[in-house]
């Protein structure tokens, strides 16, 4: 019995986890700012399956550099990025829509007014897909 290529199997399995498996992200770029490698990978793989171009930033400084040099539509931003403050990235953001990742941080009213959405950790892939889709649509 011939083995199936891994990439076909992997894509089918991952695609099934994405809300509806649609390709609604075509033409949009998402920047994922988080120091957790596995979370960035999870976001990248699932958003790329939906057609988004995904950039990753493990530090505040990397995020700031990418925002200066790239055209980004949506920023997924962790409150705590390593030893840095994720809110420092907000100073580099002009037209991009922002969703804040938070697990243990209560987002106060003033700070939540600076972002377009809040994704509470742990979140589902459906939450990720719907939030990014809504923000990318404007």
Image (cartoon, rainbow, N blue to C red):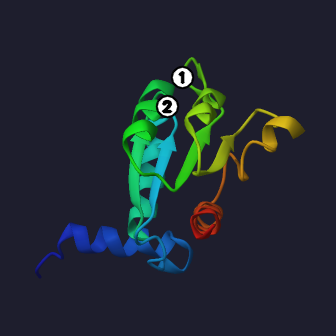
User: On the image, numbered disc 2 is attached to which residue?
Assistant: 35
Q: Secondary structure at mark 2?
A: loop
The residue lying at 48 percent from left, 80 percent from top is 22
Residue extending farthest to the front is 94
- Determine whether, in the image, residue 94 is placed left or right of residue 55: right
- Determine whether, in the image, residue 35 is placed left or right of residue 86: left
User: On the image, numbered disc 1 is attached to which residue?
Assistant: 82
Q: In the picture shown, does residue 55 fall above or below 85?
A: below
Residue extending farthest to the right is 109
The residue lying at 52 percent from left, 36 percent from top is 34
Visible in this render: residue 108? no
Asked where in the image residue 84 lies, by quadrant, the reply is top right
Disc 2 crowd rating (10 Å Cα; few below 14, some 14-19, many 20+) is some
Q: Of residues 56 and 15, which is closer to you in this image?
A: 56
Does the CB distance between marks 1 and 2 fall below 8 Å?
A: yes
Q: In the picture shown, does residue 40 fall above or below 34?
A: below
Q: Of residues 48 and 112, which is closer to you in this image?
A: 112
């Amino acid at each position: 019995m011939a083995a199936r290529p891994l990439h076909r199997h992997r894509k089918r399995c991952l695609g099934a986890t994405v809300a509806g498996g649609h390709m609604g992200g075509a033409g949009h770029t998402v920047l994922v700012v988080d120091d957790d490698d596995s979370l960035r990978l999870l976001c990248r793989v699932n958003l790329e399956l939906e057609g988004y171009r995904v950039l990753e930033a493990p530090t505040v400084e990397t995020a700031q550099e990418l925002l200066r040099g790239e055209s980004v539509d949506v920023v997924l931003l962790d409150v705590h990025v390593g030893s840095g403050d994720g809110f420092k990235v907000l100073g580099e953001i002009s037209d991009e829509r922002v969703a804040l990742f938070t697990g243990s941080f209560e987002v106060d009213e003033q700070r939540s007014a600076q972002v377009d959405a809040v994704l509470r950790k742990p979140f589902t892939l459906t939450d990720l897909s719907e939030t990014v889709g809504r923000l990318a649509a404007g």
